Amino acid sequence: MLSVREIKEILRRERITISKRRGQNFLVDGEIRRRIIQAIDIKPEDEILEIGPGLGALTEDLAQAAAKVFAIEKDIGLARILGAKLFEYRNLNVITNDILQVEFEKLTPGKLKVVGNLPYYITTPIIAYLLEKERSHVKDVFITVQYEVGKRIVAQKNSRDYASLSVFAQYFTAARILFSIPKRAFYPQPKVDSVVMHLQILKQPAVAVKQQEQFFKIVRSCFNQRRKTIANSLTQRLDKQDKLTVQQILTQQGINLRARAEDLSLQDFADIERALSKKEGFRL
Ligand code: SAM
């Protein structure tokens, strides 16, 4: 694994400056690398997509153990260095692209294990992209994210960290924090600690809803105004009569109108969505 001195030397020689804007923090702790690779539990038939391989802290181990590795790196300079360094791995394909532009089905017909020490500036868009758009081509996701984001992903109702991201992630996956990584394991050091997470894609979403888009709109609307009661969040744009009808529908479903977003489980949100879908023309 590259030391801080070697990383500095490569970047100097190749005239590359580390880009904070691209969330470039390179892993320099061999023990953490070993633990991440062990957690991924790579099988010889696995096809892996690595997001943001950088200078390849994980990439060589992935290529040694898996059938195929697609390493998607947005930074042309880093992708060039990595491609040259690991050129002898015929099963490794370093692709210069933005992960949010990659259509997974064009890489392989199989299901991918997605791995990545995510660039912090787009952690949530990447998770949304993986789960909403590319989920059917993915079986497992092993990502390193900021500690705060990790806590939000696994938070349960009645906790301060519970947010729309918790509901979103737990709707599509079984999410676990595996272990934490101190900031000193990276060069340059980020401001915060990180956690390694496993998100296992569920065969079916965790709860049944009528319309997924409407479900997420309801969740977002309730959490955007988390101090308000859900009855207020959900009826604020309606006239008096419609407000009453919606409140009646919710009450008939046993939903407490005084509850706030953080009091509601995924099942509660799903019940609300199904109840509101009965009201003709209800739109948030
Ligand atoms: N995996 C390497 C490591 O652990 O040392 C680098 C991790 S660094 C936190 C994030 C990497 O993602 C950087 O190499 C950065 O250039 C790359 N990156 C940033 N935005 C990206 C995007 N939209 N698509 C693909 N890669 C991106």
Image (tube, rainbow, N blue to C red):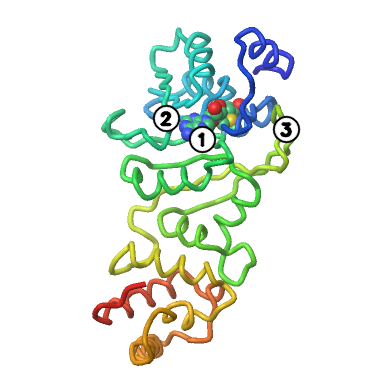
Q: Is residue 85 above or below residue 212?
A: above
CB contact under 8 Å: marks 1 and 2? yes
Depicted 64 relative to depicted 183: above or below: above
Quadrant where the C terminus lies? bottom left
Q: Which mark is residue 48?
A: 2
Q: Position of residue 275 (x, y in %)?
A: 33, 80
Q: Residue at x 61, y 16 (%)?
A: 16
Residue 130 position, x and y percent, is 41, 44
Residue 78 circle label: none
Tell me the distance, in whole angstroms, between the alpha carbons under discs 1 and 3: 24 Å
Q: Quadrant of residue 277?
A: bottom left
Identify which residue is drawn at 37% across, 41% down: 138
Q: Quadrant of the N terminus?
A: top right
N-terminal of the pair, mark 1 or mark 2, is 1
As rendered, which of 231 and 21 lies closer to the eye?
Answer: 21
Q: SS of the residue at dot 3?
A: loop
Residue occupying the point 60% across, 50% down: 150
Residues at discs 1 and 3 in contact (Cβ within 8 Å): no
Q: Which residue is mark 1?
A: 40
**Residue that carries the numbered disc 3 in the rendered image:** 189
